[in-house]
Image (tube, rainbow, N blue to C red):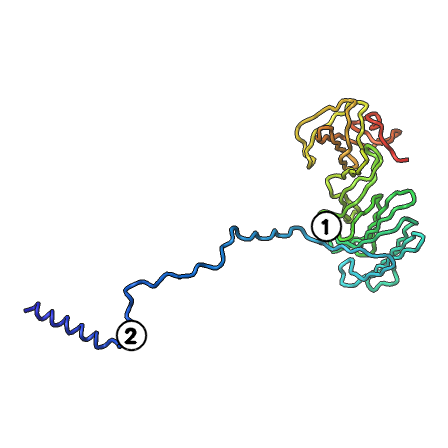
Amino acid sequence: MKRIITGIFVILLALSFAACRRPDSPVPADEPTAAPTAAPTEEPTEEPTEAPEPQTGVLDFLTKVEPDTQVSIDIDYDGMEDRIAFREDEGGKAEVEISRGADIAHVFTYEVPYSYGVTMWIMDCDPTDSRLEVVITYVQDSDDSSSVAFRVNEEGTWLDTFESGMAVTIPDGYLFEHEAGFPVSIRTEILGTCFVEGSCTVTADGFKLVSEGCLYPVTEGYSRELELKRDMELEIVDETGSATGESVTVPAGESITPYSTDLESWVCVKLGDGRIGRAAVAEATGESWGWLINGIQQDEYADIPYAD
């Protein structure tokens, strides 16, 4: 009896669902939808595009000032513009005139002696010291180079003047970074008269060499090679100047080529096999003259080419 009642209940429930369904309601398909008929039109790239390298370094303030130009700029960060005038006559004599802020009664003037052209820059050698530096460089009749830097003193009352026997050699378009300094050429007599190339900056104490050393220039068609007249003891160093722990004695008859120097305590030379050797140098004092290498007059080592 219970089975008959249950069967009647199921039939009635099915008829009820059928009566409630809308005639236009979609019926779920028994088969899955068809697969896409078209393939992708673009092939994927083999490798992802490489991201550009980030730019390193900081480009600091540096501007070249042409002759017969007047520039208004705040060189001591006191909120008032200072005036810098740069004049040069046809005979090679030049004058730098700096008046600070509203104090036109006290004008700083520096005259450059007759020379082969004067080049002038305004730069920020240290962005943390609230000072700009004015730098000029020139060459005189004797081919001696000179550079002068002007900088408002620490008290902010006047301009300090620093002179140096080097040539500032900043090319047009140079990307100046204060930590690396600016390029200079400095005359030396160590292993021969020539101008070595390094990097310099200007501080509250004046010009300061910031490169580890200065490189002897490599000139096409000209060799600085020196043949030794006596043995020379050297400490072998790598390209960065770090000692390798090796020492060598270069015998008389072999040749060396000046490579770099700090202009006061050491000089590096290249050997015939490409290694770099370093020797101690010192300027002679008292009745002696010239330079000593390992405590010995450098002329005893080789025929040193000096300028007349």
37 left or right, relative to 238? left
Foreground of the two, 153 or 94: 94
* Dot 2 crowding, Cα within 10 Å, few <14, some 14–19, many 20+: few
Relative to 33, say whether 297 is above or below: above
Secondary structure type for disc 1? loop
Q: Earlier in the sequence, mark 1 or mark 2?
A: 2
Residue 220 image offset from top left, x and y in percent: 79, 38
Amino acid under disc 1: His
Q: Label 2 sits on what residue type?
A: Ser
Furthest toward the right, the residue is: 91
* Residue named by callout 1: 178
Q: Is residue 204 above or below residue 8?
A: above
Q: Secondary structure at mark 2?
A: loop
Image location (x, y in percent) of residue 290: 85, 31
In space, the residues marked 1 and 2 are separated at their CA atoms by 79 Å
Between residue 199 and residue 163, name the one nearer to us.
199
Give the labeled residue for mark 2.
Answer: 25
Mark 1 Cα shell of 10 Å, populated few (<14), some (14-19), many (≥20): many
Q: Quadrant of residue 248?
A: top right
Q: Position of residue 30 (x, y in %)?
A: 27, 64
> Residue at coordinates 75% horizontally, 30% vertically from top-left?
279
Q: Residue 248, which numbered label?
A: none
